[in-house]
Structure formats: C-alpha cells, structure tokens
Amino acid sequence: MDFEFTEEQLMIRQAARDYAERELIQDVLERDAKAEFPTRHIKNLTDLGFMGMIVDTKYDGGGLDSISYVLAIEEISKIDSSVSVILSVHNSLACYGIEKFGIEEQKEKYLKPLARGEKIGAFLLSEPEAGSDASMQRTLAEDKGDYYLINGVKNWISNANSASIYIVIAQTYPEKGHKGINAFIVEKDSPGISLGPHEDKMGMRSSDTHSVMFTDVKVPKENRIGEDGFGFKFAMKALGAGRIGIAAQAVGIASGALDRSIQYAKERKAFGTEIANHQAIAFKISDMAVKVENARNLCLKAAWLKDRGKPFSTASSMAKQYAADIAMEVTTEAVQIHGGYGYVKEYHVERLMREAKLTQIYEGTSEIQKIVISRSLLKN
Amino acid sequence: MKILICISNVPDTTTKIRFTTDNTAFDTAGIQWIINPWDELALTRALELKETTGGTIEKITVVAVGLKDAEPTLRKALAIGADDAVRIDAEPKDAFFVAEQLAQIAKDYDVILCGIEASDYNGSAVGGMLSEFLNIPSVSSVSKLNIENGDVKVNREIDGGSETLSTEVPFVAIVQKGIALEPRIPSMRGIMMARKKPLNVLPAVETEALTEFVSYELPPAKAACKIVDSENVKELIDLLHNEAKVI
C-alpha cells in the first residue's frame, strides 16, 4: 500500500491550489453576491487543461488519472465550489458518460470539443417530480423512426446556460418503467429548447442552474447513447463516477473551512490567550481534522479503484455520503469557531457552509447514497 | 538566441526554518522545495520573450546545481515551459562553488538570467561571479528585459528612478521583481510533458568552496506586548529606562 502521490499528481494539486489562491479568491465573494458565472475563470482553467483533464489524450483530453482529478477538485473547492461544480459536471458526468458509453462517432463529434474545453457539458436527469426517484421520468423521447422527439421539463440543471452539449435522460417506453429510459446527446441550440430563469440558490451561486424545457425537440437516432433502453443504467453509472467529483468537492469545502478555522483560532484572542489554547476550540479543530482526513481517504480510495478499472460505485457512494455530511458538520463548526465573524461574508466560512449543504443534496442525496451502499451490502 | 535560467532549489517561502541540534546545518526534514521566486519570474519572462519575438529565441534551458532531489524543481520548470534542463550533480556549497559549476554550461548561451538572490541564503553573489568567470558583461537589478531585432535592452531600478541600458550578448542579467508580473501556473499538458523533455545530468567540476557555514541562529522570539495605561506616563518612562533599556 502506498500513500505517496506521484510528482505529477503533486504538481497538478499545486497548480490547482495556485490558481484558486491567486485568482478565484479575488472575486469569489462578489460572484457569490451577484450570482455571476465565472466566465473568465472557466476560460483560464480550460487553457490550463482542467476541462477534460481525465479524458484520454486520443480524444484531446489531458489523459490524467482520477487521483489527480480529485486533488484538483479539492483544491479549487477550498476556495470556490461554484467553479468546481462546473468542472465536476463537465468532467465526470458529461465527458465521462460519452467516453465510457458513447460510440466512436459520438466521441469524435461531441467528446473532443468537450475535452478541449471548447464546449461545456451538462447532465439533464432531474425533473420537477423526479429527483431521488430518478426512474419516474416524465420527459418523453418518442421514437419517430429516424429521430426521437423529446418533450418535457428538466430541473436543477447545473451548467444549463453555459453548456452547449446536453446529455438528456428521457422515457421512450413508459410501460417498461426504468427499462424504457434512454440517454441522448442533445445540442443546446436545437429548436424547441428553452431555459427557465436562473435559480436563486443558497450556495454555489456563481454556477448557472436553470430548468430546461423541451418542446418537440428532434434528436437524431445516432445521438442515443448505448442500446435502446440503456438510459437509466447509463445515468446510474455516470452518477457513480460523478460522485467522486462531488465527494472531492465536499472534502475541499470541509478542508477549506478547517484551514480558515486553524488560522483564525491562532490569531483571535479571548480570556487573555489565543482561542486555540482553549480546549473547547482545540478539540473542535481536532474533530474537524479527523473527519476531513477520513473523507479525503474515502474519496482517494474511490478514485484509486476507478483508475485501476475495479468496481468503484459503492466506494464513490460511501465517499460522497460521508464527505458531504462531514462538510456540513465541519463548516458549521467553522462558523461557530469564528463566532460573529463567521456569520459575515468577509470571513468565507458562512459561504462554505452554504456550499456544503448542496453536496448533501445533488448527484444523489445522502439518503440515496445510503440506499446504494446498503443494497450493495445486502443484495446477496 | 539561447537563454539560460539559473535556478536555485529553495524551501517554500512559508517554511518554518529549523536547524539541526548543534545549529550547524539547515534541517531539511519535511521541507517542500520550490523554484527560487526570482528565478521563476526570470523563466516567465524568458517564455514571454520566446512567444512574442517570433523565432528569435531558439531554446530556453534551466540549470541547477544540486543533488537528485533537485530534479522535481527542474521538472516543474520544464512543466512551466522550459525546453530542456540540466542538473549539475553537486551539493551547492557557496556562491563561488555554484558560479564555477554554472560557468561550464553558461558559456554556450547568449542571455543568462539569474535571480537577484535566492530566498534561502540571500547571497546575491552568483550572477556577478558567473559573469566574471565567463568574462562577459552583467547587469544587476534588472526589472525589465526586452529583445527587439536581436538587440537586448534592460531596465534597472536606481535610486529615485530607473535607467535603460543596451548590452552586448552574451551577458548575464541579474533580475529582480518586476521582470515578469507573476509566475506561470503549469498546464496539465505541460505537467505531463515534463518527463518527456531532456533533463541532462553533468558531473561537477573540481573546485573548492571559499566559505563555510559555521553556525546559524534564529532571530529572537518576539517579546510579549506590555500595555501601559495612557494615564501612567511615569511607568512607561520607567519601563523604557529600566526594562527595555532603550532610553
């Protein structure tokens, strides 16, 4: 067993850290307040190769391993999770989904521009009445011979506005339940697609979340991913990989809150000494650190399994559930350690707390992760 | 035109400095090593020049005097964009020793860039010595470097202003802050390419260091702050006289 990172992995982590600490920090509060998309940062991160970083080099990606990806997402999330969710949805849902399950023609046409970062990807699964119960798809994709006709509404779509390539999950054979679902690659500028208003979110406000309406949208037959009826399985598998990204994001949020708490506790004085010297605070820091370290190890383990081609779905659910839950706990404690200062925006920890909350909800709630984990343990 | 950037492998600037028990050597345990910040800026400027002078710069080489553990720092420079790297296989003993080592390769370059000092020992001597060994000009405190139609122009900070100089090549530019705005972050592609670029190891030339470290000491810890009531001027004067002994 080897806990050492390679020289390249360390360099990638440092590159992500440098970008976050030099650039993202400068306007993170302003973008959060104004719910403004980080256009400039996404362009810079594209130039640095973070968009499409885990796609194979033969499809113009960076060819990096999942460990490197997890390290990069953690560093960015310490400062700005709005940016890391854009990266995570793009990389580990959209790119991964097409690379793993698409055919060559689809990879040539859609994966390459995604991997180069020329286009951003989004993943359209949730609906107004299909969240955790993702098999209850109401969006219809009627088979019209040489094309599909899509009608319906998708909800809570990250990258909905910035993306130009959508992966859409829709029902083709309602009578077959989840076995009738298909997944499609849909170009956003197809006639019949319209966006709802920008969602005014509690956290990750700088990422663009919208609902997306489909009215008689024609999708060529060749844009279906996999066999007829593969869509639900596809979605679950893509989410299995996506969860590693969200787990890494939660680790980053928690670890960013811990770093800020340590710094604050060493500077702030009360009762004649730095508050770090009060056991009430020191023990909080200790508890937070153990949780962050645990979550990070779970997350790296899932990435390690994925890199070796081993089954990682249960591991990624464990990482995602634990990291998200502790991110909420750790950020709440970080606000507590900061006291009144923690409750104002300037000190960042209240924002990290708002961001942490979403990691328990999207890409499968913590409760859904427990279903995935327990079923994998109990099914035999 | 070929550019050489001399790189020092130094502890990260946020490192907590410790010495081994008898205070005669720097304790390297757990240290993260980085490119000396001034050298990194020099590399950044060299890359900018290569990109903007359309083929004038044929090669950018980075060189360090160090043992094998200096290689990750050189590979970082390759990831950022240097074309090749050279490690001269010796422990850097003092400025004279390092400058002698660098001279064996620097003679093949037109523009040789050295940071104004290294952030570990702040010796500020290698660049000047190197130019003397090579018998070529050097310009110190360079804060701007431009190459136009093969002509080299440099700006120096001087007391109350700056001056512009032109110089022959080859020459040594000893660069300071301002030479580039900020160091570059290596791209993912650059990081993956770094191992594919040449990193040549040269044996050290026979030479002696002229100085030897005897011992180190850390600056005294900051004394505790004492607050005297503003009403109590007499006590303040008394403390300044008898305790702090500054008046």
Image: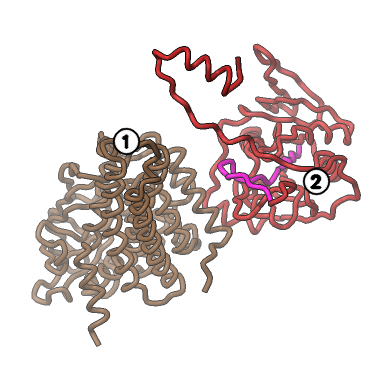
Chain colours: A brown, B red
Task: Give the alpha-carbon distance from disc 1 to disc 2, as whole Å.
Answer: 47 Å
Which is the main secondary structure of the residues drawn in magenta? loop
Work out whether B15 lies above or below B196: above
Q: Chain of mark 1?
A: A
Work out whether A32 lies above or below B197: above
| Viewer can see residue A106 | no
Tell me which residue sits at (23%, 84%) in the image.
Answer: A379
- Where is residue B135, by image quadrant? top right
Label of residue A29 in the image: 1
On screen, residue B94 versus residue A171, left or right, reads right
- Where is residue B142, by image quadrant? top right
Give the labeled residue for mark 2.
B93
Work out whether B43 lies above or below A2: above
Label of residue A120 in the image: none
Quadrant location, the C terminus of chain A: bottom left
Disc number lying in front (1 or 2)? 2
Q: Which residues are magenta?
A: B1-20
Q: Amino acid at mark 2?
A: Lys
Q: Amino acid at mark 1?
A: Leu
Q: Nearer the viewer, residue A206 or B151?
A: A206
Magenta-drawn stretch contains A78 = no
Considering the numbered disc 2 on the image, is that residue within a helix, a strand or a loop?
Answer: loop
Query: Are the residues flagged by discs 1 and 2 from a single subunit?
Result: no
| Viewer can see residue A130 | yes
- Where is residue A224, by image quadrant? bottom left
User: Within 10 Å of the Cα at label 2, are there few (<14), some (14-19), or many (20+) other Cα atoms?
Assistant: some
Tell me which residue sits at (66%, 38%) in the image.
Answer: B119
